[in-house]
Image (spheres, helix red, strand yellow):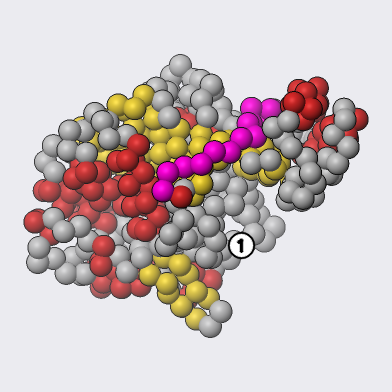
Amino acid sequence: MNSNEEKVEVSPKGHRRPMMFIVAGALLIGVMVAAGFAGGRMLGPKKSETPATLPVSNVNPIDEMRAFAQCMRDHGIANFPDPTNDGINLNGTGVDPESPEFQAAKKACEALLPEPMRQAAPARESGREGRQVRRIGTRGNSAWQKVVPGGDCACADGSEFAFWDHKADPDKVVFYLDGGGVCFDAASCANQNTPGTEEREGPDYDPNIDGENPGSEGGMFDFSRADNPFRDYSFIYVPLCTADSHLGNVTREYSPGLTVEHKGFVNGTAALGYLTEHYPDATQVVVLGKTAGAAAAPIYGGLIADRLSNAHIIVFGAQCGAFPDDPDLNAKIGELWGAFNNIPDWEVNKGLTARDWGVRRFWIQTGLHGPAIVMARFDYAFDPNATETLKYLSLNGIDPENTLALIDANDA
């Protein structure tokens, strides 16, 4: 715990290069996000970065999809539609993607598709308790399932929330809490990415799960890699689309026309419930959190330990060490997100107030509650995104340019 990067306020979701995959009978535009293992980048770059290791195609993906569509028609799927900017939608066309004719045509034409799309699988199945589960393409030889929990789950813009499950060894599970930026006032929630840059258009946080697809990511999500320490682990991938570090449970109107569904804790605990239902005999659960997800990682680690008492719990958080432990800020965020109402009812938490309940305290209380839980954190010193956040917060006594000092203070 000796360096820093954490943008728990405005961690921008940047421009993502498109890729295609087949889901539930439709061709949809997905994303390509790399997560490397070297140089402290195991959990991947900020979503605003374009990984230099990824090859850039000079072919327009829409043109490739158009050629694929024509090939499908030439091979007997007469009603196969042309793509739009949103991909190819088979709904209402009468095309059955599971028919032998479709599969034969796809086999003949799939060489025209971008490489990542060729790994996709058009299938759908039913999940338990009314959850919708869809299979999607992956790297390696394993499949991801998209799980839509329903109920009160939602993303910041009110759209549908989902998480992903990759089944492998049922005894070893990674519970991954993704980052995606947060907001907690009218200014930060209305802040937009800069037009004309590599950042994608829209809010400076992820307001929905559009483009999420762990099957297209590399690094620890590429289970074909021999150097992947988690290649044999089952995975539950929980995206952050609520601007609240997976901690909130409130609908907040920040200004007329600007309402944010801070439902991160509702979403996260739905995924946690899925974990305990589908992996009840897990002997090891690794809770990994990235940036804003790292802030909540210890809390979820403690909650998992409560539910899976025979499992060895490991918590690793990347890039949350520079978030200030300021009582007024803790209380403000706790109220705006409804986060303090979700404080675990652990004995060690008795007597704590909203002013106490901040990122630094999350790690301390989890350690006190579960001494057997192994916890570690990686931070990136002098990260410009953390500096930007601290400048926005403008807290007395904190030098935004000296994030390392803040990390050291939090670890004291």
Q: Can residue 396 be seen in this snapshot?
A: no
- Residue drawn at point x = 84 percent, y = 44 percent: 82
Q: Which residue position holds label 1?
A: 202
Residue 33 position by quadrant: top right
Q: Is residue 398 left or right of residue 64?
A: left
- Residue drawn at point x = 18 percent, y = 45 percent: 306
Q: Is residue 15 left or right of residue 35?
A: right
Pinpoint residue 160: horizontal percent, then vertical percent. 53, 57
Quick one: quadrant of the N terminus? Answer: top left
Pinpoint residue 110: horizontal percent, then vertical percent. 76, 26
Q: Is residue 349 depicted above or below 79 in this figure?
A: below
Q: Secondary structure at mark 1?
A: loop
- Residue drawn at point x = 54 percent, y = 68 percent: 191
Q: Is residue 124 magenta?
A: yes
Residue 19 position by quadrant: top right
The residue lying toward the viewer, choosing from 10 and 121, is 121
Q: Can residue 237 be seen in this snapshot?
A: yes
Q: Residues within 10 Å of mark 1 (few under 14, many from 20)?
A: some
Pinpoint residue 163: horizontal percent, then vertical percent. 46, 46
Q: Is residue 108 left or right of residue 278?
A: right
Q: Is residue 346 magenta?
A: no
- Residue drawn at point x = 12 percent, y = 48 percent: 369
Q: Which residues are magenta?
A: 115-129
Q: Is residue 135 left or right of residue 294?
A: right
